[in-house]
Image (cartoon, rainbow, N blue to C red):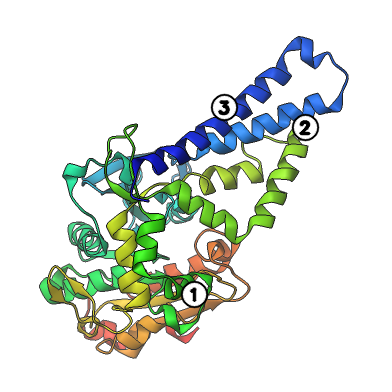
Amino acid sequence: MKFMFTYDLMETARNTNQWLGATARAFASYPAVAAVPHPMIGMMKAWGEVTERSFSRMVAKPSWDIPSVTAEDGRDHVVSVETVIDKAFGNLLHFKVSGRKPRDRRVLLVAPMSGHYATLLRKTVLSLLPDCEVFITDWKNARDIPVSAGKFDIEDYTLYCAEFIRHLGPDIHVIAVCQPAPLVLAATAYLAEEEPAAQPRTLTLIGGPIDPEANHTEVTDFGRSVTMGQLEQTMIQRVGFKYAGVGRLVYPGLLQLASFIAMNGATHAKAFTDQIFRVARGETSDQDRHNVFYDEYLAVMDMPAEFYLSTVERIFKGREVARNRFVVDGRQVDIGRITNVAVKIVEGEEDDISAPGQCLAALDLLTGLPDDMKAAHLEPGAGHYGIFAGSSWRNNIRPLVLRFIDANAKPQGKARRAKPSVVAAE
């Protein structure tokens, strides 16, 4: 399927559905049609509105839309999004709170490159801004990156993370959410060997597949059951002429979205059916629960083909990080070389993407790290999304992570070694 034709066919189908929704909404809004006393006119308009909005979301990057932050002076301070580093496949952003004294806690959120934009972590950013200086990795949509920019696989991703950490300095606290957990762990090990002074103070890994075989899910079963040839033939396509990345091999966002929805098809079908009826009754708004969730969920981005394929082959099939055999830039990194970076693992009891045990496997790889610098937390009843953006994150996990950061904020030394980790005892 490495053809522009299949890529453009999907975009054509999306564009057609968006047009059908817009047409139905416009037709049902004509005064003459609205004068017909029939309930199906209202249903047609509602269907058109929901359909148009749903399919138009799929090609638009959501806005960060960060509101002002109230500081200790009692005033609201405007938040601006600044680009600290601009690279071909991703940027390092800083959420600067204007006029506020910089916070001592400096946090780097490493967002996943798994089909959605970094804005998936918007609620995580909002929850951390009052107490931290927040930075985030903002990965770019592969369809917009010219072929001349070259490849981008998991080794490149790891080197990007290492560069961002090095740039922010050794007082940074890194939080990796989901997919980047094994690669950020490898990036830290890479720095431990190449530039020990550049390592972060702490590393928090949230629901990531360090060892996919530790506890199977549908995601890991899929990775084990298909061959790399099958994946390359069925999932990879070339970007069409509509975008700057024309000709680049990608795993298309629309194809990923189809897979996401298929995993819980009945749930999504009910959600959209209910929304159509709510629109027909006039009970919706731009900020209602359905729109807020699906504005983000349906906004998908293309992944570079080499990144997707190398993730499946080396993280899920080969388990290179889990076996401590991961190679970066021609050199094998040793996770056991991490000796002075406090590491915390966060997992959700009901996580059906990175099941409990997959992320916890990182602690066994950290053979050079003292036990009092290791911590783990299993959140009862929490699913995958809840452990970094839902109520479980806000009410339980976020306070634990901040306490962990504070307990390990001082540079490595005797005083720090003597001080027990607050979270390790939880």
What is the secondary structure assignment of the residue under circle 1?
A: helix
Image location of residue 161, percent across then percent down? 25, 61
In the figure, is residue 114 to the left or right of 221? left
Amino acid identity at mark 2: Ala
Mark 3 nearby-residue class (10 Å; few <14, some 14–19, many ≥20): some
Q: For mark 3, what is the residue?
A: 19
Q: Quadrant of residue 307?
A: bottom left
Numbered mark located on residue 280 in the image? 2
Rounded to the nearest whole Å, what is the CA distance between mark 2 and mark 1? 41 Å
In primary-sequence order, the first of circles 3 and 2 is 3
In primary-sequence order, the first of circles 1 and 3 is 3
Q: For mark 1, what is the residue?
A: 221
User: Residue sitting at 77 percent across and 38 percent down?
Assistant: 277
Of marks 3 and 2, the one in the foreground:
3
Image location of residue 352, percent across then percent down? 56, 71
Image location of residue 174, percent across then percent down? 32, 65
Task: Classify 212 as above or below 272.
Answer: below
